[in-house]
Image: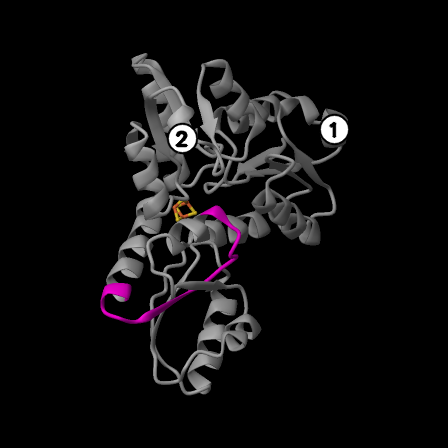
Amino acid sequence: MKKLKTARTAGFCFGVEKAVNKVYDEVGKENGKVYTYGPIIHNEEVVKDLTEKGVGVIEEGDDFTKLEKGTLIIRSHGIGKTVQEKLESAGMTLIDATCPYVKKIHNIVSRECEKGNKVVIIGSPSHPEVEGIKGWGNEETVAVNSFEEFEGLKIDKNRKISIVAQTTYNFNNFSKIIDKIKNLGYDIICFNTICNATQERQSEAQKIASEVDAMIVIGGKNSSNTAKLVDICKKTCKNTMFIQTLKDLDSEKLLSVRSVGITAGASTPKHIIEEVQNNVRSQF
Ligand code: F3S
């Protein structure tokens, strides 16, 4: 008899699940136009489904005043204070689905700026989450992706610095950067704001991939966290398949295996995972 093991951490993390549910709740209310600020998640199926249900996507450069008034859901990445204020003054009713772990960073950044400290965000400056975090700081707040970038800022050593991290930043790299900054003699307060969801998903995927004959990774083709899962799984399980939905699954590849593992990226809805799971089970 074949064995099937699905990762407990496969699919949406708690923050994404909450945000996606909020959009569907609002659509169900039929209370006027519903928007999200940026696509709610990087999953074509979900975005297509929401578009068909009439949900609009507002992008950064849009003229908010020209949009039909309605309800706007802020996705789990969050947005900056000024953007939020602009949306409110354009007459939008905001529903804040910023992940609480991200909101916590916004609060730290505001508070540390009020104290007069210089805030440094360790993360990818162009990532929407980091742009949002920066938007709760002041004109001095900066984002850097490496120790070298921090060094390049040439911050006055007498400045007190408060440091936060993008939630998905690699913990080991963050610790190394902090140690190096301390070694330069800076007076810093460090807030470890990294969320464990990504790390846990990757560790579990690696463990399952090392125990099975075939591994299925489900996720969007443009999802970087799914691509990372595929890389991790391939290292221990040569027979790793990357699929977006059940349609992409080559069942022939499962004929001769005795055990199958399944995991999924952070933007993969539960029903897609279950469909794959049920299909694989039906072949046993
Ligand atoms: Fe998800 Fe929130 Fe962590 S969106 S990855 S639970 S910071």
**Residue 115: where, in percent of width, then height?**
23, 69
Report the residue marked by disc 2.
64
> Magenta stretch: residue 116 in it?
yes
Which residue is drawn at the image coordinates 41% and 58% (left, top)?
194
Tell me the quarter of the picture where residue 155 sits.
bottom left
121 relative to 160, above or below: above
Q: Secondary structure at mark 1?
A: loop
Amino acid identity at mark 2: Phe
Which residue is drawn at the image coordinates 31% and 60% (left, top)?
109
* Boundaries of the magenta span: 113-128
| Quadrant, the N terminus | top right
Q: Nearer the viewer, residue 204 or 93?
A: 93
Q: Is residue 9 left or right of residue 230?
A: left
Q: Is residue 93 left or right of residue 2?
A: left
Q: Is residue 27 left or right of residue 205?
A: left
**Residue 81: where, in percent of width, then height?**
32, 47
Q: Crowding at label 2, few (<14), some or many (≥20) Cα neighbours within 10 Å?
A: some
Q: Nearer the viewer, residue 155 or 3?
A: 155
Q: Give the numbered dot on residue 206.
A: none
Tell me the quarter of the picture where residue 45 sits.
top right
Report the residue marked by disc 1.
255
Q: Secondary structure at mark 2?
A: helix
> Magenta stretch: residue 74 in it?
no
Question: What distance separates the C-alpha of mark 2 from that of mark 1?
Answer: 54 Å
Tell me the quarter of the picture where residue 12 sits.
top left
194 relative to 179, above or below: above
- Which of the two discs, 2 and 1, labels the residue nearer the N terminus? 2
